[in-house]
Amino acid sequence: MEQYLKFFIFIPFVGYLLSLLIKQKQEKLIANIAVATSFLQLVLLIVFSVNWFIVGANVLDIKQVTLLTTPEFDFFIDFYFDKISVVFLFVGSLLTLLVAVFSKSYIHREPGFKRYFNNVHLFFLGYSIVVIAGNFETLFLGWEMIGITSFLLISFYKNRYLPVKNAMKVVSLYRLGDVFLILAMWLSHHLWHGNISFFQILDFNATAALIHKHQVLATFIGVSIVMGASIKSAMYPFSSWVARAMEGPSSSSAIFYGSLSIHLGVFLLLRTFPFWQHIFIIKVLIAVLGVATSLICNSIAKSQPTVKTQIAYASITQIGIIFIEIALGFHNFALFHFIGNAFFRTYQILVSPSVLHYLIHNQLFSGITKKVTIPSKLSNTFYMLSIKEYNMDATLFKYFWQPFKWVSNKLLILNNKYFYIIISILFLLGIYFDINTFQFHPILLKSFVYLFSFISLMLILLSFNERASSISAWLNVVYGHLFIMMCVSINSHIAFSYLLLYLLSICFFGFIGFQAIRNLQKQAALITLEQFHGNGQLHPKLSILFLVACLGLIGFPISPLYIGIDLLLTYIERDQYIIMIFVALCLIFIEISLLRIYTRLFCGIPLYSNEPISFKSA
């Protein structure tokens, strides 16, 4: 029966391809394909699960295909099926089916009807891949799909300022979580000296012995997993992004942030439990995050004035409790809790517009004056903190994003031709060193490794802060990618055939994006990055082409760069934390910079329109 496991990926993938081929005007057919896809998935799951239980319900682990093999690394797609997969697939298939049926009428005659269902298909595909993934590499493939579809659905109304702004906020935090997962993969390669599957860590004694031998390394892996799960599931202090994500259509909010996407952090913890169960500090960390989140988000939910925000924080409160249950080992209870929370929040979000409509004429405002006492002062303090959502947005901006903005502002002094001439000479020198490694002292080579990793970060931060020229911002990202490649190549002397995978991807998608901007320059009067230009409405095909180029350079699974990034990270040694930090920061800001260029060029109101133009920074 193992051969049927791949159909859980094949069905949503075929549905997605069919939805791309249908014309925008054929709304009924587009929606029916989405309904049919999720229904077939649900029927297959029921039949498959019944047979699986009959034959003994043993864990299934199937290595599907090897994409790349090197002497040190084996990149393969692996599928895994157990009771956690059954529960998450069942909830995902049934809720996607219900939301698809609901959306047929809810999104009817919206200009982005087809775009909406395309993104729902892609999300369902990514979700299915995550749930039956048998190793980190396969899981990360679906994880990336879900992140991008979140960005596209939050900015569904892309001619408005707030949806685009909040989409950038959410994807910035998502990318931070992605990089923690990348760090976990990198460290896992060094702990196991290869690419391992989740099935291998089920061996309790072997995993416990390995962790005992490498306690510090294993703890770092555990912390990276917990941070990635916490950001995905909006644990404190990252909880505020869920309320911002509600800018999209209510139906997409229901399936993403009410039920499925928001619980993927829970899934990640359950899937990796056989590993981190041996590390007591990780259990404590998960429990503390759960307690803090449930208490803080419960108070925020009770004080917010908007119904969607109340539902968002109420859902996060329950997920915090699920985190506690997982830390304590109550996994069956956590799965049951997930089912209840997912269905209930989906229902709440779907009916929230109707509830507001019914109650809008029955609002009662009254002012009550009472004597202020010390307890009431304390109560009022917590009330104000809850109204302000404990200043989570401001805190994250002040202590994480603002320092990088400050650094990138200081780097603007380097934004001149002399800087690029100097680093180009260094790049050519690096190529020479890489070819003739045996002629140079190891200390000199290592110095160039650290220098190139620092230059790559400077280039990405320059792109992140570029306002005048979209071409300069784009080329800085491309050049930054090349310096990352050269940094790792000099560090580990990788065979050129493996570097070629990374290099060709950069050049191909870099050229497509460059040409798209050049073509836009010929047709648009002004395309600086100071404001949103709304060119997506005027040039929809160019918008799609540029988005594909952005996704290619980010490392989305449409590009061999997805494999290339994982391959390069494998060649960074376990004690080279500074290089890894620089590269990780580059990966965060590459996605933010590229999507920022895309939103500024193609989202917002066109300049010729009579509607207000968005000037504020996203």
Image: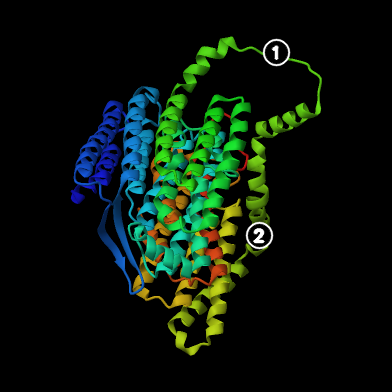
- Circle 2 residues within 10 Å: few <14, some 14–19, many ≥20: some
What residue type is disc 1 on? Answer: Ser
Tell me the amino acid under the disc marked 2. Leu
The residue located at (35%, 37%) in the rendering is 92
Vertical placement of residue 166 versus 142, above or below? above
Q: Please give the label number shown on residue 270.
A: none
On residue 412, the disc is 2
Residue 186: x and y in percent read 45, 64
307 or 55: nearer the viewer: 55
The first of marks 2 and 1 along the sequence is 1
Q: Residue at x 58, y 40 (%)?
A: 293
Asked whether the residues under the numbered discs 2 and 1 touch, taking CB atoms below 8 Å apart as contact, a structural biologist would say no
Label 1 Cα crowd, 10 Å radius (few <14 / some 14-19 / many 20+): few
- Is 113 situated left or right of 573 in this image? left
At mark 1, the secondary structure is loop
Image position, residue 271 (x, y; %): 39, 50
Q: Position of residue 290 (x, y in %)?
A: 55, 43
- Residue labelled with disc 1: 366
**Residue farthest along the bottom direction in this orientation:** 439
